[in-house]
Amino acid sequence: MDYAWRFAKHNCARPAFLVLLIGLVVLLFSCEPLERDNPLDPQNPNSTRPRKIVVEAFVNTANPLQINEFALEALYQVQDRHQPQLLVLEYHRDTSQYPDSLALAESLSPYLTYINLFDGQAGLPDIFFNAGMRRVQGASSVGNSITRLENALNGLLDQTSRFAVEVETTRQGDSIIPTVTVARLGVDEARNLIIKAVLSEQVDLQYLRHVVVDVSSLPVTRIASGTFQSFTLPELRALNSRGKLQLTVYLIDRDLSEIYQGVQIDL
């Protein structure tokens, strides 16, 4: 029940928890067995959590046409509408014509994986929702991009997840070490997952709010149903940071085709 409290404290109002805890105390001192009808209990077979939507934007802001800026401005407006459900990340990439000073080498591999889930055609800006769930490529204006992004979110905003994720960090100078706790809800075990931790930086408030600066990951073989496990991921480095840092952690399948749950915290 300690676990249920830890995961619940971010999702319910405090008065509701006081009532819940009082009820649990009464049940604990009764002769009847405790029923698994608490939706915050990971061993409740009907337990779920609201599903976060990880939005990964692959961009190049060195392009003078500003189509990437159109996409980012639209994405920020859509994010503001749907806080805190949207977890936004910006992966900057070089192109043959326009090297991007914020480009990260680690952005190439996931991008190639994602585009191959669709038509295999590369082109920036390119925005993916929970990995291969949805995609919006290109931008002609801010207004048009907002419409396309909102259309992509249809059917995603009301989804639930059979996972709950929490993250804590230990910081030593420029080194950030995430400890991630994952709960498998419901009655089915989970296998062949990857926990991915992404460190991002707010370079400016106009177009560069969630610039990815480092990435680490850890494979997970199995999590039994109704249980939780904690994992320490490889360190992330915040070298020469210029603004506020954020850490986004998400749980994805081994094929990198679907993100099941995520969390984003300020550092």
Image (cartoon, grey):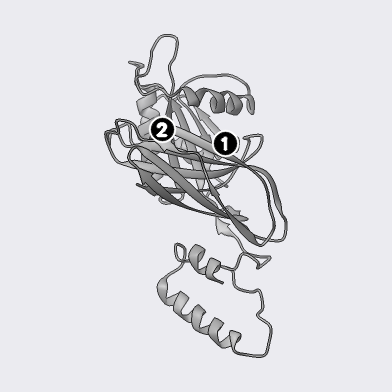
Residue type at mark 1 is Ala
x, y percent for residue 169: 42, 49
Seen at 65% across and 66% down, the residue is 43
Dot 2 surroundings within 10 Å: few (below 14), some, or many (20 or more)?
A: many
Q: Is residue 227 left or right of residue 75?
A: right
Residue at 40% x, 30% y is 71
The residue under the point 38% across, 39% down is: 175
Residue on which the image places disc 2: 212
- 200, above or below 43, in the image: above
In depth, the one of 148 and 162 nearer the eye is 162
Nearer mark to the viewer, of 2 and 1:
2
In the depicted structure, whether residue 61 falls above or below residue 17: above
Determine the secondary structure under disc 1: loop
Q: Is residue 124 above or below residue 83?
A: above
Q: Position of residue 98 (x, y in %)?
A: 38, 12
Q: Judge left or right: residue 257 versus residue 150.
A: right
The kind of secondary structure element at disc 2 is: strand
The tag earlier along the polypeptide, 2 or 1, is 1
Q: What amino acid is found at the position of numbered circle 2 in the picture? A: Val
Can you see residue 201? yes
**Residue occupying the point 35% across, 22% down:** 61
Residue in front for this viewpoint, 43 or 67? 43
Residue furthest right as drawn = 188
Q: Quadrant of residue 251?
A: top right
Given contact means CB atoms under 8 Å apart, are the residues at marks 2 and 1 in contact? Answer: no
Between residue 15 and residue 129, name the one nearer to us: 15
Of the numbered discs in the image, which one, if any, rests on residue 131? 1
Query: Where, quadrant-wise, is the N terminus in this rendering?
Result: bottom right
The picture places residue 36, in percent across and down from the top left corner, at: 66, 74
